């Protein structure tokens, strides 16, 4: 049995909280020491809070204007966790197996200080193929020696389902008190590799995680991603060896192979929205 803490930010989570709590409680092979939810205060959050307290878990509140994916998680780990291993999940993941937490947590230690699990999408849309490409069948570990080979891909990670070794997170000052609305996981991955630690991708720890974005939402998401890269020029020195155009044509190839008509119709506008959003976001100059 591995003692763990769990951190999960919540935003208008009425439709998620009950299944989320059930998923967490069904986990085998781990001792749930602290399970803490960070609730963004928007609208009536009383139902969510009631369900959390009924489950014996805890929460703290964050005003909407104060929320960030980095600082909210950092606060949770610094102030509400005590175990060496902290599992982070997002509210919209579905734990596909009763040992998902255990499979992830058992790989985290004083050497491999960050690990993320496999994400799948059951509906065969564009996201399904992207997940298949980004989340392979083989567990892999990455160290600083792999950066030259992998380039930007060396820092790929996802806090939708990840595990942190808390002593090192504290030692390295988490996300350096930088407010980030996305990609805090990628920022931290780079940081730990450069500090001499390792990152793991654990293919045996599986969650279902999917979105349904309109083209406008997709454009805005990649626009914000472009802004993030613009604000973090330290990533400019690395090439996108296995992403971008290659990923787009991988999706197209898979859709053609499976004669997936809905994906074929969606492919061009979808990829165009991603490309234009990213390109526009990278051009924004922070004032």
Image (cartoon, rainbow, N blue to C red):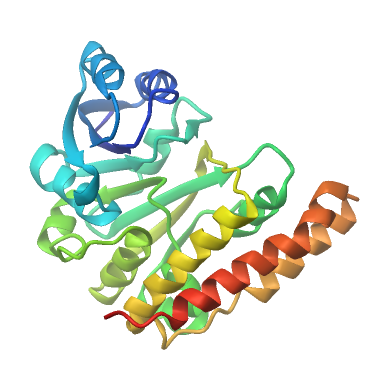
The foreground one among 183 and 201 is 183
Is there any visible trace of residue 1 in the rendered image?
yes
The quadrant of the picture occupied by the N terminus is top left
Q: Which residue lies furthest to the bottom in this view?
A: 237
The foreground one among 233 and 62 is 62
Q: In this view, does 49 lie above or below 118?
A: above
Q: Is residue 192 above or below residue 257?
A: below
Find residue 145 and report its horizontal and vertical position in percent. Answer: 39, 79
Find residue 63 and report its horizontal and vertical position in percent. Answer: 19, 42
Q: In which quarter of the image is residue 104?
A: top left
Residue at x 22% of width, y 56% of height:
110
Q: In this view, does 48 lie above or below 186?
A: above
Residue at x 46% of width, y 74% of height:
281
The quadrant of the picture occupied by the C terminus is bottom left
On the picture, is 265 further left or further right than 47?
right
Q: In this view, does 274 lie above or below 61?
A: below
The foreground one among 278 and 198 is 278
On the picture, is 65 further left or further right than 207?
left
On the picture, is 161 further left or further right than 123?
left
Residue at x 52% of width, y 65% of height:
222
Is there any visible trace of residue 82 in the rendered image?
no
Find residue 89 and report its horizontal and vertical position in percent. Answer: 37, 40
The foreground one among 283 and 267 is 283
Q: Quadrant of residue 84?
A: top left
């Amino acid at each position: 049995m591995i003692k763990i803490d769990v951190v999960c930010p919540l935003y208008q989570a009425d439709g998620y909280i009950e299944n989320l709590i059930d998923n967490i409680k069904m986990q085998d092979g781990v001792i749930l020491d602290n399970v803490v939810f960070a609730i963004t205060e928007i609208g009536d959050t009383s139902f969510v809070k009631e369900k959390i307290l009924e489950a014996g878990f805890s929460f703290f509140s964050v005003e909407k204007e104060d929320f960030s994916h980095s600082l909210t998680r950092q606060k949770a780990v610094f102030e509400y966790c005590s175990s060496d291993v902290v599992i982070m999940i997002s509210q919209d993941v579905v734990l596909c197996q009763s040992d998902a937490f255990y499979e992830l947590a058992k790989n985290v230690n004083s050497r491999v200080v960050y690990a993320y699990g496999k994400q799948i999408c059951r509906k065969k849309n564009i996201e399904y193929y992207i997940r298949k490409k980004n989340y392979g069948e083989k567990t892999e570990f990455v160290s600083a020696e792999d950066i030259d080979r992998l380039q930007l891909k060396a820092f790929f990670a996802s806090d939708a389902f990840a595990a942190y070794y808390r002593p090192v997170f504290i030692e390295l000052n988490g996300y350096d008190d930088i407010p980030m609305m996305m990609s805090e996981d990628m920022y931290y991955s780079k940081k730990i590799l450069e500090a001499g630690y390792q990152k793991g991708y654990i293919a045996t720890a599986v969650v279902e995680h999917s979105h349904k974005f309109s083209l406008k939402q997709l454009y805005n998401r990649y626009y914000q991603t472009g802004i993030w890269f613009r604000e973090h020029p330290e990533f400019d020195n690395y090439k996108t060896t296995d992403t971008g155009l290659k990923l787009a044509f991988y999706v197209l190839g898979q859709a053609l192979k499976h004669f997936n008509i809905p994906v074929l119709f969606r492919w061009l506008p979808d990829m165009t929205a991603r490309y234009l959003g990213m390109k526009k976001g990278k051009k924004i100059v922070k004032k």
